[in-house]
Image (spheres, rainbow, N blue to C red):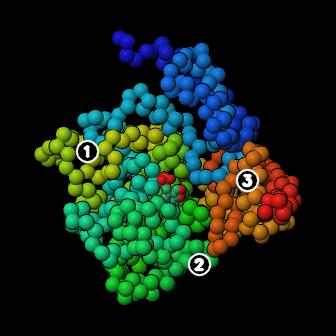
Amino acid sequence: MAHGWNSSEYEQAAAIAVAALLDYVAQSEAGEGPAVSAPPVSELSGELQLRRLLRDGGLTLDSFEPWLQKLLAHTTRLHHPGELAHQVAVPDVPAALADLLHGAINQPTSIYEMGAATGAIEAAVIEWMTERVGWSTGAGGVLTHGGSLANLTALLAARAAAAPDAWRDGVPSGLAVLAPPSAHYSIKRSVAMLGLGESALIPLEVDELERIVPERLEPTLERVYADGLRPMALVAAACATSTGLHDDLEAVGRFCREREIWFHADAAHGASALLSPGHRPLLRGIEQADSVIWDAHKMLRTSSVCAAVLLRDERRLEAAFHQQAAYLFYGDRDDGSGPDLLGRQVECTKAPLGLKVFLNLAFRGESGLGEFVRAQYDKTQRFFELIEAREGFECLCRPESNILCFRHGDDSELQVELRERLLAEGRFHLSSTEVNGKRWLRMAVMAPATDQSTIEALLDAIERLGTGAQRGLHDPARQA
Ligand SMILES: Cc1ncc(COP(=O)(O)O)c(C=O)c1O
């Protein structure tokens, strides 16, 4: 069988990969190697022999190991304590096993008969998520390839509720989506992709920390009506990507219910805090939402990608899509055998995303995952105190999650320069963000290995780089 599965190759190659990954993760957790290595693409292309291998093949079991080592050397080491840049999960072992299984069994979890076990798992994961949000019968949802797609799907359902004929006839004019300016960019993108036009996004009034001001919802809505617009949805964040702060979902939810507006809670990052009893109150009011998104590939420790779009009334998700495909659907397949998901998702072929969430839950328990969230959130509180106590540093505010904004001095350009210099050294990887017109350094504390000593070393490095960075900024040659 020339093209069959080569068991011996699989066994040997997997053993090589597992051994290399064991070293990689152990070194990363110990803070060895750079947190991030991103040489110019032309250099990497050469080092990894990409053009030659793509065209001619030739990788063998003997050459695989050294090649893999070169690949691993130029990764962003998520397990590394100094990797603090983005909300990307540090995968846990059970989720990594799910990816291994998927690589061999390849179950496209869209049509039940094409992957019954993984289809049943996705249904169970969705049911569990809707319960955690606080919904009971009638709720439902679907897993998607990422939070951006989940936001698009939620807003598509909102569009179907506001304009049921839009699928056939196109979008009527005058629909509006209300969201804080700090909403994740996928909201604006979705509004544009759904045919409303970007200008249909109406900014909600926010405070100095970019959180929705519930008392100002009414005047904004009055203005929307006065302009002849019709609200299709109102979006709140739990938590905001930039600051890690939560909108008051309870107040926003009450307002939306009273005014009969579709309430969409973007809880891509924060929904996992529902599993930590001490942090659940941050999400108070989420159960009032019509739709919620929840990324497992942020705080539920799955690899990218794995997200969910959840609806309080799942019939509204079914109503979002009106697609026909004769080779896939025929007659009424609602025979109780198992769910076909094509009628509620953008994707046709879809990975068995639920398997990653399920295995993490099955091995660690809900309390284990909740304990992870608690640990990361609590650590971030300690880091806040540490940074505030250091002269020359300040934080934007006390964090509510594991996202923390801080700065050295108050020069916005300096923060950018410091981040670049840290990145060039490779030991620490931060992001930066703008809040209320000022630039801040930003950390997302995702790695279990990040501790107080990491942050002390980070602050030392920033102090050391600070003088040079300041001089660099004022270098006349640079400014010319
Ligand atoms: C609040 C929020 N919503 C949506 C997204 C988009 O999710 P994804 O990156 O999975 O597409 C993000 C990503 O960081 C986010 O923070």
Identify residue for label 2: 207
Neighbour tally class for label 2: few under 14, some 14-19, many 20 plus, Cα within 10 Å: few
Residue 151 lies, in percent from the top left, at 41, 59
Q: Are marks 1 and 3 in contact (CB under 8 Å)?
A: no
Tell me the residue at 35%/63% (across/down).
Answer: 194
Asked whether, in this view, residue 331 is left or right of residue 27, the answer is: left
Res 291 quadrant in image: bottom left
Can you name the residue that lies furthest to the front here?
Answer: 480
- Give the Cα separation between the discs numbered 2 and 1: 44 Å
Asked whether, in this view, residue 160 is left or right of residue 85, the answer is: left
Q: Are marks 2 and 3 in contact (CB under 8 Å)?
A: no
* Dot placed on the residue nearer the N-terminal end, 1 or 3: 1
Neighbour tally class for label 1: few under 14, some 14-19, many 20 plus, Cα within 10 Å: some
Tell me the residue at 79%/59% (across/down).
Answer: 478
Q: Amino acid at mark 3?
A: Glu
Res 288 quadrant in image: bottom left
As helix, strand or loop, the secondary structure at mark 1 comes to loop
Neighbour tally class for label 3: few under 14, some 14-19, many 20 plus, Cα within 10 Å: some
As helix, strand or loop, the secondary structure at mark 2 comes to loop
Q: Amino acid at mark 1?
A: Asp
- Give the Cα separation between the discs numbered 2 and 3: 30 Å
As helix, strand or loop, the secondary structure at mark 3 comes to helix
Residue 101 lies, in percent from the top left, at 44, 30
Tell me if residue 301 comes above or below residue 238 in the rendering: above
Residue 17 lies, in percent from the top left, at 58, 24
Q: Are marks 2 and 1 in contact (CB under 8 Å)?
A: no
